[in-house]
Every structure is written in C-alpha cells, then in structure tokens.
Amino acid sequence: MIHLRLRVPDDRLDPVVEQLLDDDSVTNITVQPGGFRKPEGALVECDVAREGTHAVVARLRTFRIHHEGSITLTEPETLLSDAAHAAEVAAPGHPDDGLVWDAVENRVRKESQMSFAFLAFLSLAVLIAGAGRLLDQPILIIGAMVVGPEFSPVAAICVGLARPRLSILPPAIRTLVLGYCIAIAVAVPFWWVTQMLGYASRAEAEFGPLTEFIVEPNGWSFVIALLAGIAGTLALTTAKSGTLVGVFISVTTVPAAGTIALCIGTGVWEEILPAFVQLVLNVGGLVLAGTLTLMLQKRYWQRVGARHTTLHRP
C-alpha cells in the first residue's frame, strides 16, 4: 500500500474526496477541513493499493493539487487492515509489480543530481577498480562495482526517454559524463604518483589474466549489460529494490573507467581504447534495455488499467 497525504484547496475538497471515495483501490480516507494553516488548505489522507497509485495520482493532478496544494507519497512498512487487503484485491495487477511513476521519477531526479557525495563515491569506485586491475584481483573489481553510484543517472536517462520527461535528460547526462570525467581525472594523478614511487609499473597495469575481460569488449559485454538493464529497471520500479546490488556487480562500467585512469597514469596507451569501448557498450546496453523495459511496463499498465476500468464501469 501507498499512503497519500494531500493538501487540498478548500474549493476542490468535495470533488477530490468524492473521487477517492469512488475508487475501490483507495481506503482509510481521512478528511480534516482547515487541517493546514501555512499554506491553508484541507488535509486529506488515504491508503492506496500500490498498483492503483499512479491512476489515483493522475486523477488528482487534474485538480491541480500538485500545483496549488501538495501530494506526498510514502510507503508504510507494515499495514494490518482487512480494508487495505480488500483495496489491494480490487486494484488490477499484483502489488509488487505496481509502477508508481511519480515516485520513480522523483527518485531518479534526486539521485541523479551532481553532488559531492556522487563524485566522491564514483571517484573512490574508480580508484578501487584501478587497484583491482593493477593487482589482478576480481574481488576489488566487485567492490568497485558495488560502491559506484552511476546507475542513478543511467536510470534517470531511461525514465526521461520512456515516460517521456525530456527535462530529466540534460542533468542526468551531464552527471553521468562529467562524473566519469572527474573521477578519471582524480584517479590519473594518483596512479602517476604511485608509478613514480615504484608501487606500480606499466607491466603490472597491462597484465592481469583474471581481469583481462575489462579490456576485451565483445558481444557478451553488450548482452550482459542488456540483461542488467532489465533487472535494474525492474528493481527500481517494483518492490524489489534489493536486486539493484546484483545489477551493480554485473556490468563493467566502473571497472572500465578505473582501467582507463590506470592506463593513462601508467602509460599503457594501447588498452585505453578497449576499456573505453567496454564502458560505452555497458552504458549503452543499460540505457537501451532500461528504456525498453519502462516502455513495456508503461504499455502493460495502460492496458491493465483500461481493462479494469471497462470491467468495473457501472
């Protein structure tokens, strides 16, 4: 279930409440006229079946609640209620599969912003990945994949293309591209100094049979990125967000960036292009698969919603 907390202008309170009362996927409706003092408005709260939330919020938008009032969505961890169970049964589809577009869009907008934390985590991930390639340690490569935050702007690009919300694209693309450039720029001097001090060498940087896959892009690189993109998008849009960790450790984005920085810092010029191709293949596969998955989900829920409306039309 999703909990809605609304600030409704007084002149729209009655039609909004009527709209909620007429929807079988909505329950536990509370109405407090004058509940808000700054800004003024009525307080309306209710619980909505996850799979019916997008349709409910879409109807609330027709009353301009999101502009002249407010709509807050939260997800209770536990809700014990027969009425809530009945609302879930009345809603189309399965609760875990429900696509709450507003929550997804808000999340990717927020998490794809360029920030010190994003750059710090990405730079650390690139450094760890470079160390993994230098020492030929796959465990360090996996660690770098988990630390890297780059899936957030990738997901934002997918949402921007699929919904579509073109305003999301420029900041997300800037965060992704500039973030990698800054992270690599931070790592290159580190590896140059490390080489000067004798703790790294060109031979060590270019030889590593256990991590050679980073500089050997092929068709499987793209296929795995496609599969990871589907899994990541499903984890983002459904109630299975724990799956995102598996996505992080299945694509060679951060390892490729870390290898590029290591190669520049130690002078292994011939491996820079293969690592860059690996990076582009993986990012491209994630974006393509994620966008197509969102478009299919969008189409599926449009058809389910239309069929549900037809079946329950009086």
Image (cartoon, rainbow, N blue to C red):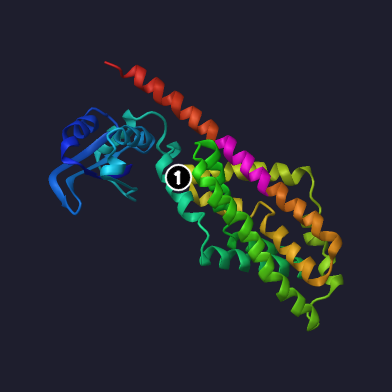
User: What type is the residue that disc 1 sits on?
Assistant: Glu
Q: Is residue 142 left or right of residue 149?
A: right
Rendered-image quadrant of the C terminus: top left
Q: Residue at x 74, y 74 (%)?
A: 191
Q: Relative to the observer, which residue lies in front, 54 or 141?
A: 54
Extreme top residue here? Answer: 314
The image quadrant that residue 180 belongs to is: bottom right
Q: Is residue 289 magenta?
A: yes
Determine the residue positioned at 69% across, 48% down.
282
The answer to whether residue 136 is seen in the rendering is no
Is 248 covered by the magenta stretch?
A: no
Q: Please name the residue that numbered disc 1 is placed on.
A: 105
Please provide the residue range marked out in magenta.
283-293
The total number of labels drawn is 1
Q: Residue at x 78, y 80 (%)?
A: 199
The percent coordinates of residue 302 (x first, y second) are 44, 27
**Looking at the image, residue 199 lies above or below residue 109:** below
